[in-house]
C-alpha cells in the first residue's frame, strides 16, 4: 500500500470532519508534505463527489471510502479465494497470483442499503470494460475476492451484498420487508451498475465501452434477470448454474430433497460416510456410457443406476444402505411431480454425489443439509408478503396448493420469462453454463428454460443461438472448482469475441488443473444440444481427441 494510502487510512475520520469545513485535498497534501499524483487525487476525490441524483434519486449513491492502492500483495488466503472466484466468474487468473495492479478502491452504498465494492485499475491499465459479479445464495456479504480477480485482468470490477447483511441461507432479513426482497430479486444489480458507471465516468472521464455481468447460482439468475428487466444495462451475460425459476428451486427442488433426506423428526437419514459408497456405485454403473472411463459422467440421462443394489442383505449393517436410506436416495434422483404426475422439476443428476456432502448429508453434526435451509428459510421469510407464523411446520407446505399464493413472489423473483427480444435486439449476448454434477440446482431446469426461450424466439421468427448459448459441463459442481470435471474456462474472452468481434462460440475450451495450477486435461464443450464425443483413440486429456456429436 502506498504512503498516501496509509496516511489517509489513519486520518480518515478527521477527513470526514474536514470536508464539512471546506477540506481541500490540495491543502492536505501541502500540509503533510506528501506528493499526490493526479490519479491518486482523482481517486480520493470520489469520496467527496455527489452521486445523490442518479436516476433522479432512485439510485442515490454514497461513496464511503476511496483510496488509491499501490503494489498490494494478497495474502495466501486472498490469493486462493481470488483464484476460485475468477473461475466462478468465467474470467480465470493464474493460481498463486499475488500482486494486484495499482488501482482505486471504492466502497459505498446505493439507497437504501445496497453495499458495494468497486476496484478501478489505474488509468493506464484499464481495459475500458466494467464487470459486475452478482452475489450468490441469499447474498448478504460484499466479497472482496471477485474485484481482486477482475482487476488482475484489468476490468473495473464490482461486487455487492444484494441489499442486506446475512450469511449462507439466512432469510430473516426479508421478513415482512418488501423493499429488501425487490432489491435482492433484481433491483440491486441494476442500481449498482448505474452507480458504477457514474463513478467510472468521474474517475476515467469516460464511460466503459462494454459492460458485463457474471455470477453463479443466484448470481447466474441475476444476469438472466438483468437481460429481461434491464436489457440496456449489460452488453454481455455469463450465467453459471443459474437459479432461473427461483421460487421453484427453493420450494420444489430443495423442499422435496429436504423431505427425502430428513426423517419425521428432522434427523438426517444419510451420513457423510454413506456418500463415497453411493458415488462409487454410480460411477461404476455409468462411467463408460460416454465411451470413456475417466471418472466423469458426461450425460446423466444415459445412466440407469438402481439404488436398490446398495440395500443391506439380511443381517448386514456395514458397507450398505438401510431400506430407509435406499428410499431417500431414490427420491433424490427422481424428478418432482405434481398431483397429475407431470414432471415439474428434475431430480439430482447421477454424478452429483461428490457434492452431496453439505447439500444432502450435513457437514457437521450441528448442521442440517443445505437443501433444508434453502427451502425453509425461503418459505418462512421470503415466499409470502407476510411471514408465516413462527410455529409453522414446514412439512405442512404443499407447493401445488400454494401456487396462487406464491404468484406475487414468483413475479418478483423468477427470471424464467422466455421473452428476451429486447436484450437480443440491442445486441446483447449471453453464455449460460451449467455443471452436470450440480447437486444444488439440477441442470435439467436450465435445459427446460433454454428450450422455452428457443421455442418462444422461434415463434417470433428469431433464433436463440444468435444471442444466447447453453453449455453443459460434465463433472462440474455447483459454483465449485474442486469436482471431477474441468472447471476452468475463459468464458469472458469467448463472450467478448462474440460481442466485439462477431465470432459466435461454437465451442468452449475447458481445463482441469492440478494443485499447482498446471493444466493437465483439456476438453471442448459444445453449445446445447451438441456434446463432446471421444474419438476412441486419442489422448483423452487433449481437446483434439473430441468432436461434436450426440451421445447415445
Image (tube, rainbow, N blue to C red):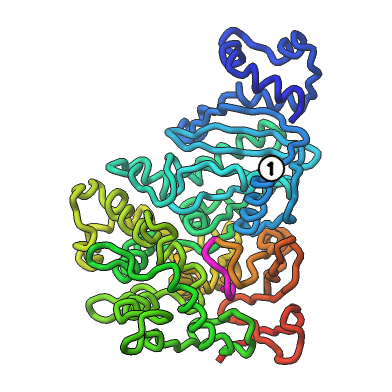
Mark 1, other Cα within 10 Å: few <14 / some 14–19 / many ≥20:
few
Q: Position of residue 275 (x, y in %)?
A: 46, 73
> Is 476 in the magenta?
yes
**In the rendered image, the vertical position of residue 273 relative to residue 95, given as above or below:** below
Q: Residue at x 37, y 70 (%)?
A: 270
- Which quarter shows the N terminus? top right
Q: Residue at x 21, y 50 (%)?
A: 388
Segment tinted magenta in the rendering: 472-479
**In the rendered image, the vertical position of residue 39 relative to residue 250, given as above or below:** above
Hey, which quadrant is residue 320 in on the image? bottom left
Q: Position of residue 292 (x, y in %)?
A: 64, 87
Q: Is residue 290 among the parts visible in the rendering?
A: yes
> Is 482 in the magenta?
no
**In the rendered image, the vertical position of residue 211 relative to residue 312, given as above or below:** above
For the residue pair 203 and 486, the one nearer the viewer reads as: 486
Secondary structure at numbered mark 1: loop
In the image: residue 407, left or right of residue 2:
left
Residue designated by label 1: 75
The mark tally for this picture is: 1
In the image: residue 97, left or right of residue 16:
right
Amino acid at each position: 500500500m502506498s504512503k498516501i494510502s496509509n496516511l489517509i487510512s489513519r486520518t480518515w475520520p478527521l477527513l470526514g470532519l474536514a470536508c464539512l469545513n471546506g477540506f481541500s485535498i490540495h491543502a492536505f497534501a501541502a500540509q503533510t508534505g506528501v506528493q499526490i499524483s493526479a490519479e491518486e487525487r482523482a481517486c480520493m476525490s470520489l469520496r467527496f463527489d455527489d452521486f445523490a441524483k442518479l436516476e433522479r434519486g432512485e439510485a442515490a449513491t454514497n461513496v464511503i471510502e476511496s483510496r488509491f492502492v499501490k503494489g498490494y500483495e494478497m495474502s495466501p488466503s486472498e490469493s486462493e479465494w481470488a483464484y476460485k472466484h475468477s473461475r466462478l466468474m468465467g474470467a480465470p487468473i493464474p493460481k498463486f497470483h499475488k500482486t494486484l495492479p495499482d488501482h482505486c478502491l471504492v466502497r459505498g452504498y446505493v439507497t437504501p442499503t445496497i453495499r458495494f465494492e468497486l476496484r478501478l485499475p489505474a488509468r493506464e491499465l484499464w481495459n475500458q470494460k466494467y464487470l459486475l459479479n452478482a452475489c450468490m445464495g441469499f447474498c448478504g456479504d460484499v466479497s472482496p475476492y471477485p474485484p481482486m480477480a477482475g482487476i488482475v485482468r484489468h476490468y473495473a470490477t464490482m461486487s455487492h451484498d444484494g441489499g442486506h447483511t446475512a450469511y449462507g441461507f439466512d432469510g430473516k432479513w426479508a421478513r415482512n420487508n418488501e423493499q429488501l426482497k425487490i432489491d435482492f430479486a433484481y433491483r440491486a444489480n441494476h442500481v449498482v451498475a448505474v452507480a458504477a458507471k457514474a463513478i467510472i465516468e468521474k474517475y476515467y472521464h469516460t464511460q466503459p465501452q462494454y459492460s458485463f455481468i457474471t455470477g453463479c447460482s443466484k448470481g447466474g439468475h441475476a444476469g438472466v434477470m438483468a437481460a429481461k428487466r434491464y436489457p440496456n444495462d449489460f452488453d454481455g451475460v455469463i450465467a453459471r448454474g443459474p437459479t432461473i425459476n427461483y421460487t421453484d428451486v427453493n420450494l420444489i427442488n430443495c423442499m422435496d430433497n429436504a423431505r427425502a433426506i430428513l426423517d419425521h423428526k428432522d434427523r438426517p437419514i444419510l451420513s457423510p460416510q454413506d456418500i463415497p459408497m453411493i458415488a462409487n456405485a454410480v460411477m461404476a454403473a455409468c462411467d463408460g456410457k460416454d465411451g470413456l472411463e475417466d471418472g466423469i459422467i458426461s450425460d446423466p440421462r444415459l445412466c440407469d443406476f438402481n439404488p436398490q443394489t446398495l440395500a443391506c442383505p439380511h443381517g448386514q449393517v456395514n458397507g450398505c444402505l438401510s431400506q430407509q436410506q435406499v428410499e431417500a436416495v431414490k427420491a433424490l434422483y427422481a424428478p418432482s411431480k405434481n398431483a397429475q404426475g407431470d414432471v415439474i422439476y428434475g431430480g439430482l443428476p447421477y454424478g452429483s454425489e461428490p457434492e452431496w456432502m453439505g447439500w444432502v448429508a450435513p457437514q457437521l453434526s450441528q448442521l442440517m443439509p443445505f437443501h433444508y435451509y434453502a427451502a425453509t428459510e425461503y418459505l418462512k421469510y421470503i415466499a409470502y408478503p407476510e411471514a408465516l407464523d413462527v410455529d409453522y411446520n414446514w412439512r405442512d407446505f404443499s407447493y401445488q396448493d400454494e401456487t396462487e399464493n406464491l404468484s406475487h413472489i414468483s413475479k418478483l423473483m423468477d427470471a424464467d420469462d422466455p421473452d428476451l427480444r429486447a436484450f437480443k435486439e440491442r445486441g446483447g449476448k449471453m453464455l449460460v453454463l451449467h455443471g452436470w454434477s450440480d447437486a444444488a440446482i439440477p441442470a435439467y431446469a436450465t435445459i427446460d428454460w433454454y428450450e422455452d426461450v428457443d421455442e418462444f424466439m422461434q415463434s417470433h421468427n428469431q433464433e436463440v443461438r444468435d444471442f444466447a448459448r447453453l453449455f453443459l459441463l460434465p463433472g462440474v459442481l455447483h459454483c465449485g472448482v474442486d469436482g471431477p470435471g474441468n472447471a476452468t474456462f475463459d468464458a469472458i474472452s469467448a463472450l467478448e469475441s462474440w460481442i466485439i468481434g462477431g465470432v459466435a462460440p461454437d465451442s468452449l475450451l475447458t481445463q482441469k488443473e492440478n494443485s499447482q495450477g498446471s493444466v493437465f486435461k483439456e476438453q471442448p464443450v459444445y453449445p446445447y444440444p451438441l456434446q463432446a464425443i471421444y474419438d476412441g483413440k486419442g489422448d483423452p486429456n487433449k481437446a483434439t481427441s473430441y468432436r461434436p456429436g450426440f451421445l447415445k
